[in-house]
Amino acid sequence: MKKLTYIQGAFVLTLTNLITGSLSFIYRVFLTRAIGSEGIGVYQLVLPLYSLFITLVSGGITTAVSKLIAEQAPKRNYRNMYKIVKICSITIAMWSLILCTLIFFNADYFANHVLKDYRTLLSIMVFTPAIFFISIGGVLKGYFFGLQDVNPPALIDILEKVIRLGGLLLTTYFLLPFGIEYVCAGVMAAMATGELISLALLYFSYKLRRTSIVVNTQTDSTIHIMSRILKTALPLSFSGALTTIMDMVIAILIPMQLRTAGYSNSNALSLYGQVTGMVMPLLFFPFIIVVSLGITLVPAIASSYAAGNWTALSKKCNDSLKITSVIAFASTALFVIFPWELCRIFFKCPEAGNMLFWMAFVCVFEYWQFTLFAVLNGVGMQHVVLKNSILHIVISIICSYFLIPIPSIGIYGFIIGFCASAVLVCLWNLVDLKRIPQIRMDYRSIFIKPFTAFIGMFIAIKCCNLYLTANGIHSSNMTISSLVGLVFFFLVLFLTGTFTAKQLKSTFAIK
């Protein structure tokens, strides 16, 4: 089997996530049009709780397993790898069964007293099995990511999303006449079914891979493995849980504070649905590339850091941030110039474009934040990730609590908090990363050059769009001018030496 570099692995995962993300985005558009802003608001109430339980069960486990497997891979200590997977799987299975049982029998409490909407009851009961399937699947994915063998989980994700999308469309079609709560429950049922299929395929792939390798080597003790796993996973799990709790608090806080500002319950839930169900999915759709990079970056950084290969470590940091900047700046240009058009085309809700416009300005900071978290995790600074995640939560909640009730600000109080936390946490991550003097950051390459390309793209799109509209071309002006802008963007990147043909050839040459 040919080994992929972390960028090649990220490229494979990006293609996978583009496919699966597109499928999810298509369904989100379909669901939004079917049940409207209020229905999406109910759906968005359930998701943070769902994410919280997943984080409590398996948060950080994929990263922890991939990091440990990456350390064992150069030694070819396969017996230790299998022991890591076995111990993690048994522990996670026992913990998830306990938590899932508690969730199922207390669903009424979560619906009526936590989310404060009885329409979420069925969804909470139905999504419980998915939590168990996801937790075990996270261990197996960590095994493959640690070996830099992303193909099995990537292909399985695509198949699972296709099956899930079919189930989602069918359940929505048949359950829509029964009301929003039944549609949301049907969505969760389709998700649980998809996760079960994904787990079965991951286990089958793991068994195939395992039976082909027989090497007798010594293994670490169970206590040692558990301590290593917990040392990495617990801070990440706690960080993820806090972030998810923040999402839940925001889900309750935004409608509540909007009502305080004078909005009706329906209008408050509608605005919440716009910002979380329309604007955020658009803003973070290109983010799937950055997520893919982060998944493969953690074990790659951990491997170089453990070996003391500082040159490779610095290169990986700079290359990953350079790619992140390219994605972020290109996305920012499109979101800033065409926010209303994008919201009208995808959601038939052009008024949501106002929120997209302002949130787009911190796109680069939000994207950088994730990549920097991946680097910090790779060098064993999980406590820093936790600290900065708490900072992000505090800023967002304070701004939402105090600014949203002001009638002249309203929903933009949440946006102010989102932007402020993105900038401050990103800068704080950079400060923390400077504590490792061996990592040398090339800001000219990772920020200034991509920003220059962004300016060229912005001007090109604006000029092209003005020319097209002045000549009566309105139906395809956004598509044409965006393509012209992207051509200018990548042209400037090559002219400034941000990327070279030699670098691209070296990056995608299979070793």
Image (tube, grey):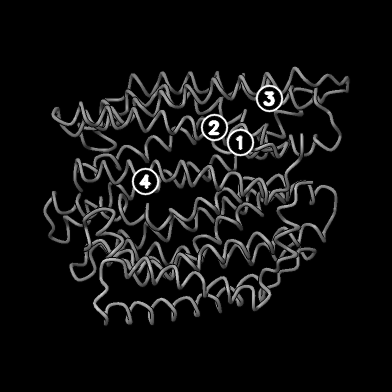
Kind of element beneath mark 3: helix
Residue 342 location (% of width, % of height) = 31, 61
Q: Residues within 10 Å of mark 2 (few under 14, many from 20)?
A: many
What crowding class fits label 4: few (fewer than 14 Cα within 10 Å), some (14-19), or many (20 or more)? some
Q: Give the secondary structure at mark 4.
A: helix
In this view, the mark in front (4 or 1): 4
Foreground disc of the pair 4, 2: 4
Q: Identify the residue under disc 3.
A: 85
Determine the secondary structure under disc 2. helix
Q: Which mark is residue 25?
A: 4
- Determine whether label 3 and label 2 are within 8 Å by CB: no
Crowding at mark 3 (Cα within 10 Å: few <14, some 14-19, many 20+) = some
Q: Earlier in the sequence, mark 3 or mark 1?
A: 1
Q: Which residue is mark 2?
A: 58
C-alpha span from label 4 to label 3: 33 Å
Mark 4 or mark 2, which has the lower sequence index? 4
Give the mark nearer the N terminus: 3 vs 2: 2
Q: Residue at x 75, y 39 (%)?
A: 70
Q: Give the CA distance from mark 4 to mark 1.
A: 25 Å
Residue tagged 1: 62
Amino acid at the residue labelled 3:
Val
Which three-letter amino acid code belongs to the residue tagged 4? Phe
